[in-house]
């Protein structure tokens, strides 16, 4: 029992007495600076009551924004180009859910095994499955290749950026930054290369976005540091892309030239009037060999004799093939 000392100031306790409990050094004490208990054990008994593990959880989604929010109330993470996956762990059994609720544990074998080996009895994790390339960049085409029959699943990485439940504690209602502290501590104890902690910076969102874009990354995701986890899309999470994007119709393709195989470039169009598909340009870079072959098979099956572009004179010379693919757009 640590010694108790009476104090002479402060608010009087029961019977007019104030007491201060002091813990002296004992066998459990550790030298100053040897460890950071807050980092190692950031949980609090008071704010993490035991709760049953939910059977399912819908992920929180980010709202598209033009620029990162300013101020230190926000933290900023890298935006990855992969599959959003939430992980449910219970007594060594892992389920990896896509955004539409499909369980991909069998398809993402290395990730499932790494999650099963975590030093936790139960947990819900949130993150993105990616394949890293040189410079830390991620590319969706590389991920698709890794998941194909001829791919290498050992290259899969699960970037975990949030933890919603952990060993009986429902963390969704505590601040994001504290959830991430617990997540970082858990992943450090796991030590598996297939699991990557989704780190962040606090404040300086514009500078962080600028550096992300200079390194060829997708963009950033900005999140309120004190926000709770709320399923669905909201303003607490915001995504900012490095480049502008749009949806276009694939209206045609060219034959390959030089050492290129399958196809040369895709011819893109956009509707400038009802029933009128205008030619807007071509794209021929950023495709892997496997993607080119897959695209070629799909497009050849839809090939037609006439061009869908109006007027036809706008289409560059040398275009030998044309195909109309709606890509989710309406005339």
Image (cartoon, rainbow, N blue to C red):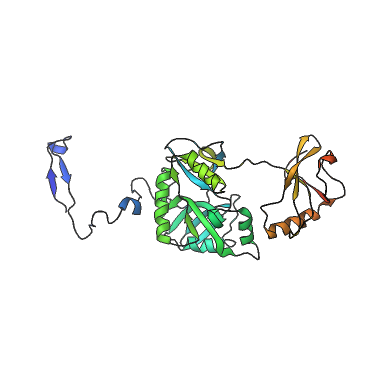
If the image is split into quadrants, where does the C terminus sit? top right
Residue 248, quarter of picture: top right
Q: In the picture provided, is 142 more to the left or to the right than 190?
A: right
Q: Name the residue nearer the viewer: 82 or 41.
A: 82
Residue located farthest toward the right when viewing the structure as drawn: 305
Q: In the picture provided, is 242 more to the left or to the right than 190?
A: right
Residue sitting at x 62%, y 57%: 142
Residue sitting at x 54%, y 36%: 67
Is residue 114 in view from this perspective? yes
Residue sitting at x 52%, y 56%: 158
Residue 314 location (% of width, % of height): 81, 40
Q: In the picture provided, is 245 more to the left or to the right than 253?
A: left
Residue 304 location (% of width, % of height): 85, 50
Residue 44 location (% of width, % of height): 34, 48
Residue 263, quarter of picture: bottom right
Residue sitting at x 43%, y 62%: 191
If the image is split into quadrants, where does the N terminus sit? bottom left
Q: Is residue 226 above or below residue 150?
A: above
Residue 187, quarter of picture: bottom left
Residue 121 location (% of width, % of height): 43, 59
């Amino acid at each position: 029992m640590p010694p108790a000392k009476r104090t002479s100031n402060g608010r009087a306790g029961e019977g007019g007495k104030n007491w201060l409990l002091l813990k002296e050094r004992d066998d459990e004490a550790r030298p100053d600076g040897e460890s950071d208990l807050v980092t190692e054990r950031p949980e609090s008994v008071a704010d993490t009551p035991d709760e049953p593990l939910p059977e399912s959880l819908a992920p929180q989604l980010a709202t598209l924004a033009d620029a990162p929010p300013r101020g230190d109330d926000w933290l900023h993470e890298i935006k990855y180009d992969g599959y959003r996956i939430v992980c449910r762990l219970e007594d060594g059994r892992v389920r990896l859910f896509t955004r539409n609720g499909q369980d991909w544990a069998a398809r993402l074998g290395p990730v499932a095994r790494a999650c099963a080996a975590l030093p936790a009895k139960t947990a819900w994790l949130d993150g993105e499955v990616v394949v890293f390339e040189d410079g830390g960049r991620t590319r969706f085409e590389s991920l698709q290749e890794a998941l194909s029959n001829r791919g290498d699943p050992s290259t899969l990485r699960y970037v975990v950026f949030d933890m919603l439940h952990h060993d009986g504690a429902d963390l969704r209602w505590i601040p994001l930054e504290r959830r991430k502290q617990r997540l970082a501590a858990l992943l450090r104890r796991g030590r598996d290369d297939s699991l990557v902690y989704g780190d962040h910076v606090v404040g300086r969102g514009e500078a962080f976005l600028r550096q992300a874009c200079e390194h060829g990354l997708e963009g950033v995701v900005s999140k309120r540091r004190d926000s709770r986890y709320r399923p669905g899309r909201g303003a607490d999470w915001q995504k900012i892309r490095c480049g502008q994007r749009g949806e276009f119709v694939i209206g045609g393709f060219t034959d390959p030239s030089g050492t290129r195989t399958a196809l040369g470039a895709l011819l893109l169009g956009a509707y400038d009037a009802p029933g009128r598909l205008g030619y807007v340009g071509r794209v021929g870079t950023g495709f892997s060999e496997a993607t080119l072959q897959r695209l070629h098979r799909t497009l050849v099956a839809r090939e037609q004799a006439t061009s869908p572009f109006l007027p036809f004179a706008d289409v560059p010379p040398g275009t030998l093939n044309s195909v109309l693919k709606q890509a989710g757009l309406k005339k």
